[in-house]
């Protein structure tokens, strides 16, 4: 696939740049010749089937997986502990996360440990910062509640607050809407758009949900070991691309331009 950065506006800052990346596990290629980029000021969606390499691609971006071939740049340099301080990462929600005996404000304080130090107790200034972050995601009223009793959508808002603790330029989200009802999903993605619009925080998010990605992302990468599409969200799913990514048996329900999700997305970008 050709390098997609050639056709992107040069005035935007290049945050992530993968050039001809190949990754193999146990002698099996899980990513082949991937060219991928994300620029400042955009929400970028990565969609594809289970086992198609989506999480591996995120791990390459984060510097947690080293490709056998190709180059990776995060904020203009090789991924490192230093560069990872400039991003916030949300892994997939797990049962362990939901049942961990900790309060909401304590979850956010975990995101400040790089500043505080793991062997130091958070002080009043740190707790004030945590409360300010919770206020940004409309969860300050829940600060003293156990994290485990929150709904899925509320937990993701708290997780976003924790990720914001490092003042990131980029948020990387792995299946952020899993286990969240449709109303909470809309609220969550409106929050991401607000962070992008008001704080210039870019987003890369992985999902298997085609509707979510096409409704809320500015650009989309369709991945199944190889990238079969890397461009604007509005025209990502031609029948040819869909078959290459999801196979011959895929059935897609496409919303028309009167649906609430599509309407709000286009309004936000007008």
Image: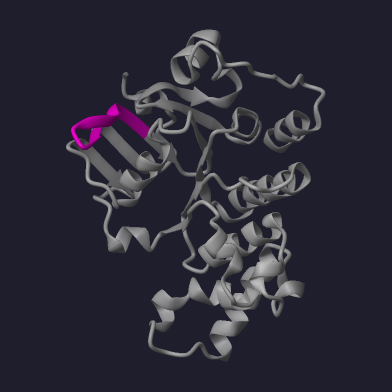
Q: Main secondary structure of the magenta part?
A: strand
Along the viewing direction, whichever of 210 and 161 lies nearer the viewer: 210
Along the viewing direction, whichever of 223 and 214 lies nearer the viewer: 223
Residue 31 falls in which quadrant of the image?
A: top left
Along the viewing direction, whichever of 68 and 96 lies nearer the viewer: 96
Residue 237 falls in which quadrant of the image?
A: top right
Q: Position of residue 171 (x, y in %)?
A: 49, 52
Left/right placement of residue 207 relative to residue 183 reads left
Q: Is residue 28 magenta?
A: yes
Image point (67%, 65%), residue name: 136
Q: Is residue 140 visible?
A: yes
Height in image: 187 above or below 54? below
Image point (71%, 76%), residue name: 145
Image point (81%, 32%), residue name: 260
Q: Position of residue 230 (x, y in %)?
A: 44, 25
Q: Position of residue 2 (x, y in %)?
A: 31, 19
Left/right placement of residue 134 relative to residue 172 reads right
Image point (61%, 45%), residue name: 178
Along the viewing direction, whichever of 157 and 126 lies nearer the viewer: 157
Q: Position of residue 26 (x, y in %)?
A: 20, 37
Tell me which segment is drawn in magenta: 22-36
């Amino acid at each position: 696939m050709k390098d997609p950065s050639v056709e992107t506006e040069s005035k935007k800052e290049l945050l992530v740049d993968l050039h001809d990346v190949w990754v193999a596990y146990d002698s099996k290629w899980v990513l082949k010749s991937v060219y991928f980029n994300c620029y400042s000021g955009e929400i970028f969606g990565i969609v594809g089937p289970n086992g198609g390499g989506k999480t591996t691609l995120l791990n390459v971006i984060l510097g947690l997986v080293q490709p056998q071939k190709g180059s990776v740049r995060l904020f203009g340099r090789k991924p490192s502990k230093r560069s990872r301080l400039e991003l916030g990462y949300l892994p997939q929600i797990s049962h362990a996360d939901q049942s961990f005996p900790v309060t909401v404000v304590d979850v956010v304080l975990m995101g400040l440990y790089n500043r505080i130090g793991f062997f130091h107790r958070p002080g009043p200034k740190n707790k004030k910062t945590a409360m300010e972050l919770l206020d940004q995601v409309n969860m300050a009223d829940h600060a003293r509640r156990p994290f485990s009793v929150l709904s899925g959508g509320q937990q993701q808002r708290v997780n976003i607050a924790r990720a914001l603790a490092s003042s990131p330029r980029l948020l990387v989200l792995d299946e952020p809407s899993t286990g969240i009802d449709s109303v909470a999903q809309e609220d969550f993605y409106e929050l991401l758009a607000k962070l992008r619009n008001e704080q210039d925080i870019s987003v890369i998010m992985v999902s298997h949900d085609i509707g979510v990605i096409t409704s809320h992302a500015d650009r989309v990468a369709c991945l199944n070991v190889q990238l079969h599409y890397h461009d604007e969200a509005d025209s990502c799913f031609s029948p040819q691309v869909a078959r290459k990514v999801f196979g011959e048996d895929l059935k897609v329900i496409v919303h028309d331009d009167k649906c609430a999700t599509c309407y709000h997305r286009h309004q936000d970008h007008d």
